Structure formats: C-alpha cells, structure tokens
C-alpha cells in the first residue's frame, strides 16, 4: 500500500534535520529540548546549523525590544537561505515558537510570509500536528491559550522519553505567571500560573537521573509559586517538593530558578538550611530599590521587606550567594530612586547579577505610564549599576581563592587533561582530569579566580608544567 508521506513511514531511510535556535530564558532551553524530542519521533534529527537543516525552529523571547527584533533579522536571513534552497530544488520549513510567537501571533506571518508556522508556549504538545499541517501547505498559527493542560496532555511516549544531554538538566515544574509586574510581558506570553503535579515531576526527575543526570534545576517563571498535592493529600510548596526530590538515589544537586521574593515561604527557606544538596545559590530578583518604583512596578514588597527576607535566608544558609535582576529607568524613576537601587545593592551584595535598561513592552501597563526616562539617563544609570555589581562579583570570585570547594564535573575542558565542572555558586571550575570523572562530585582547592571562572590548584599546576 502506498502512503502519501514516505518520510514519516520510514524515518531511518529519509531523516530530516531540524535546527532549533533558542533565545531568552532557561525555560526556553528546556522547551527547545522537549520540542526536539517530540520532532525526533517524527523522524527529525537535530543539527547544529541552519545550513543543512530541513526545518528551522526559532524559540523566541519577547522580554525586551531587542530580543524581539532579533527574531525578525533571523527570519530575514533564513528567507534568503530558503530562496537559495528553492533554486536548488529543495526547501526549508521555518517555524516560530516561544514568547514572540505568543505575543505577535499572526502578525509574524504577515510581516514575515516566509514563516510556515507559529506556535505559542502553551500549545507545544500540539507541535507534531502543527508541523504536519504546515507540511501540507497550511500557514498554521497556533497561539490560542490551550484550554487543556499542556502538562497533562503530553503524549505518554513524550513523558517517558527524557533524552539526557549531560550531567545537569532543567526540569520545568511550573509555568506562567500571575504576578503582573507592570514592565513584564511574561504573564501575557506564558499565561496563568500552572503547577505540574508531584508524581509527574518525580517521574521525570527519576528518568533524568537514570539517564546520568546528577544535578537538576527546577524551572518556573515563578518557580517558588509552585504548589501541589502530596500522595497523602497534604498541600506542598516548593520546599516540600525539594525534600521529596532529594530522596532520589544518585541525584547530587538541586537548584531552582526564578523565584519571586513574595513566594519565599518558611518551608522553602528551611529547605536551604536542611538540604545539603540544595545548592547555596539563589536568584532572587528585586528589580529596584526605591519603594515608590517597586510600587509602580507592582512588585508588592518594599526594599526593606526584601532586606529582611535576605537576612532570614542568610541565617538559614550562611554560605548562600545571591544573584539578582535589576531594571533601571522604569517610568518615573528619579535620580534619588536610582540611588535607592544602588543602596540596596550595597546592602545585599550580589555574587552575580543581570541588569537592564527598562524597555517598554506593548500591552504592559508600564508602556503607557508617565515619566519615561531618557535613553542617555538610562545608559548612565546602567553603567554605574553595572560597575558596582561587577565589583561585587569580582570580590565574590576573589573570596573563593584558596578555598576548598565542591565541584560537579560536567565535561572535558578546552585543554588536554582538563575537566570542567561547576561550583555550588554556578561558576565554571577548571579541574585536572586526575581528580575524578565526568558526573563525579569532587572537592578541589581554588588557586585563582578570573572574571567568570575558577581554576583549581591541580589544573593550575599542569598549566605551569606545560
Ligand atoms: N520570572 C522572572 C523574570 C523573567 S524576565 C522573575 O520574576 O524574576 C527576567 C528579567 O528581565 C526580569 O527579572 C527583569 O529584570 C527583566 N525584564 C523584564 N521585563 C523587562 C522590561 N520590560 N525591560 C527591561 N527589563 C525587563
Ligand atoms: Fe514577569 Fe514579574 Fe511574573 Fe517575573 S514575577 S515573570 S518579572 S510578571
Ligand atoms: Fe523571554 Fe519568554 Fe523567557 S519572554 S525570558 S523567553 S518567558
């Protein structure tokens, strides 16, 4: 019997290649992997360049204007690639996923007709169907928020097949956000907060560990808003979930990101005290230091609330390092407001930070507020803030020199005889291969810190000997 689509009947004989390009946050990294896994069942293998791909899938970010604009330049380049392909009698399918897909929907195929399909983050479980329809020549735009729960509707097979890509892995436990910070598109692009059920999370974590993963980072746009029901019917928050995951044999480290200060409850703070394998590193964005600006941002906490919270967390886990996100030049931010941001940074002291100029996003309340700050003022403030944050980061790195720290070995290093792992605080650590093998958790002495990485004594010795 002859079928219309031989490729899907015999994938081995006719493999197609997909190139997935990921922008934005770790959730997109996770989603890209899951989408690649889903496409693998349709006979696609992943490739690392668009040049030999049959399909390019852009997993996009809408958080700031520049992020969104990058997508259209990329589509422009792909359109040319596709034209060259078509001249040679071949083709290239172009798909747009992620937060730009969700925010702009049909606009994308209007502005960039080369795009074959657009799929929003709450509907990824429909990807195989979307691709099939696009292959039949339909322009598919799938961005209605799914009424069904995306997590509940993962095909059985997809739930089971967790392709591991190394020693560390992301695991999404929560998606969406109900916080509606006035600068942020995420509640509009990712929809309302949804928590994955405990059993599903534990199962996926087990599979990851069986596949060789030793460190899991739980992901959520607002990960500490995760809540679920235990087997015995008790209500759990992220703290309890972490305890449950810590029982998995073979798992060495747990992390979670990104958290909102308002959802740091007692159980989660206690987990930092009680669980050694919960790494002493916490990304806890404050965004700004001025109470007036925090209020306008709808963060629903003050600068002092945040300071007190940090004190409690540090009491529970004294070696914890904090990282943060900051926005400068939010509408109405005065020089004095900005000084409050500098002050909170000095008070808290961050090991790592991400700071941005406010970027008005269409459809968010911030975009239409009064008092937009001039670009040059934003730039000056950002420069000053980044200088301070840079000093703090350098001081933190320096403080590790001479210390013995735990490293989870992840991959071969750049030079022969090296292995690279991560410290508890996420910095890459260059180790000597004699300390252990990939997947091992080892203790090494730090000889030197550079801007972004640490070098162990043994590795430094080998370098000197070479
Ligand atoms: N869910 C995360 C935030 C994701 S966005 C959280 O609540 O922390 C990552 C960071 O981008 C934010 O923390 C914020 O600092 C920054 N950001 C978000 N919207 C922005 C905008 N419109 N302009 C500039 N920076 C923005
Ligand atoms: Fe955006 Fe605020 Fe939600 Fe974070 S908490 S995703 S910054 S709305
Ligand atoms: Fe960007 Fe969407 Fe993540 S806007 S930061 S990809 S949730």
Image (cartoon, rainbow, N blue to C red):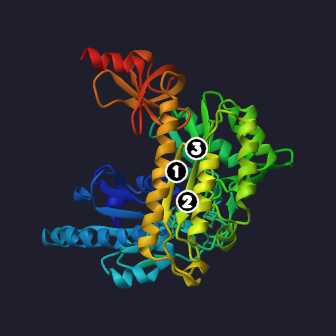
Residue 73 marker: none
Q: Is mark 2 within 8 Å of ligand 1?
A: yes
Q: In front here: 247 or 345?
A: 345
CA distance for labels 2 and 3 = 22 Å
* Of labels 2 and 3, the one closer to you: 2
Residue 65 percent location from the top left of the image:
43, 72
| Residue 458 image offset from top left, x and y in percent | 39, 16
Tell me the SS state at disc 1: strand
Rendered residue at 44%/26% (across/down): 438
The residue wearing badge 3 is: 217
Sequence-wise, which precedes: disc 3 or disc 1? Answer: 3
Mark sitting earlier along the chain (1/2) = 2
Q: Which residue lies at the image location 53% right of the left edge and 22% below the top edge? A: 403
Name above or below for residue 395 compared with residue 58. above
| Along the viewing direction, whichever of 185 and 359 lies nearer the viewer | 359
Q: Secondary structure at mark 3?
A: strand
Q: Residues within 10 Å of mark 3 (few under 14, many from 20)?
A: some
- Please, is residue 110 above or below residue 67 in the view? below
Regarding residue 258, the answer to whether it shows in the image is no
Q: Is residue 458 visible?
A: yes
Indicate which label's residue lies in the foreground, 3 or 1.
Answer: 1
Could you tell me which secondary element the residue under label 2 belongs to? strand
Where residue 261 appears, as percent x and y from the top left, is 70, 55
The residue pinned by badge 1 equals 353
């Amino acid at each position: 019997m002859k079928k219309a689509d031989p490729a899907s009947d015999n994938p081995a004989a006719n493999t197609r290649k997909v190139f997935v390009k990921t922008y934005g946050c770790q959730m997109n990294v996770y989603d890209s992997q899951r989408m690649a896994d889903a496409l693998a069942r349709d006979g696609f293998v992943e490739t690392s360049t668009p040049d030999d791909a049959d399909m390019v899938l852009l997993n996009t970010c809408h958080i700031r204007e520049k992020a969104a604009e990058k997508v259209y330049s990329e589509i422009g380049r792909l359109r040319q690639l596709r034209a060259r392909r078509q001249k040679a009698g071949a083709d290239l399918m172009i798909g747009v996923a992620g937060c730009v897909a969700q925010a702009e929907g049909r606009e994308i195929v209007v502005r960039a007709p080369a795009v074959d399909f657009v799929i929003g983050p709450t509907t990824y479980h429909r990807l195989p169907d979307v691709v099939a329809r696009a292959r039949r020549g339909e322009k598919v735009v799938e961005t209605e928020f799914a009424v069904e729960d995306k997590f509940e509707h993962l095909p059985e097979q997809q739930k089971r097949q967790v392709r591991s890509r190394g020693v560390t892995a992301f695991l999404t436990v929560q998606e969406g956000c109900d916080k509606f910070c006035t600068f942020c598109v995420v509640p509009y692009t990712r929809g309302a907060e949804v928590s994955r059920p405990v059993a599903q999370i534990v199962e996926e974590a087990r599979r990851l560990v069986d596949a060789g993963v030793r460190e899991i980072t739980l992901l959520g746009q607002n990960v500490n808003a995760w809540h679920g029901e235990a087997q015995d019917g008790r209500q759990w928050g992220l703290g309890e979930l972490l305890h449950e995951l810590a029982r998995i044999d073979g798992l060495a480290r747990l992390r979670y990101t990104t958290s909102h200060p308002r959802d740091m409850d007692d159980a989660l703070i206690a987990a930092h005290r009680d669980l050694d394998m919960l790494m002493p590193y916490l990304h806890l964005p404050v965004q700004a230091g001025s109470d007036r600006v925090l209020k306008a941002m709808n963060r629903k906490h003050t600068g002092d609330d945040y300071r007190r919270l940090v004190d409690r967390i540090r009491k529970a886990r004294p070696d914890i390092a904090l990282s943060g996100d900051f926005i400068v030049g939010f509408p109405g931010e005065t020089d004095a407001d900005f000084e409050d941001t500098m002050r909170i940074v000095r008070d808290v002291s961050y090991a790592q930070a991400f700071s941005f100029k406010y970027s008005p996003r269409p459809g968010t309340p911030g975009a239409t507020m009064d008092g937009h700050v001039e670009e040059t003022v934003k730039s000056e403030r950002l420069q000053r803030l980044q200088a301070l944050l840079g000093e703090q980061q350098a001081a933190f790195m320096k403080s590790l020199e001479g210390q013995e720290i735990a490293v989870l070995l992840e991959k071969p290093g750049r030079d022969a005889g090296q292995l690279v792992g991560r410290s508890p605080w996420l910095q890459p650590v260059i180790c000597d291969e004699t300390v252990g093998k990939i997947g091992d958790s080892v203790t090494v002495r730090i000889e030197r810190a550079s801007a972004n990485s640490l070098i162990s004594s043994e590795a430094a010795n080998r370098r000197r000997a070479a």
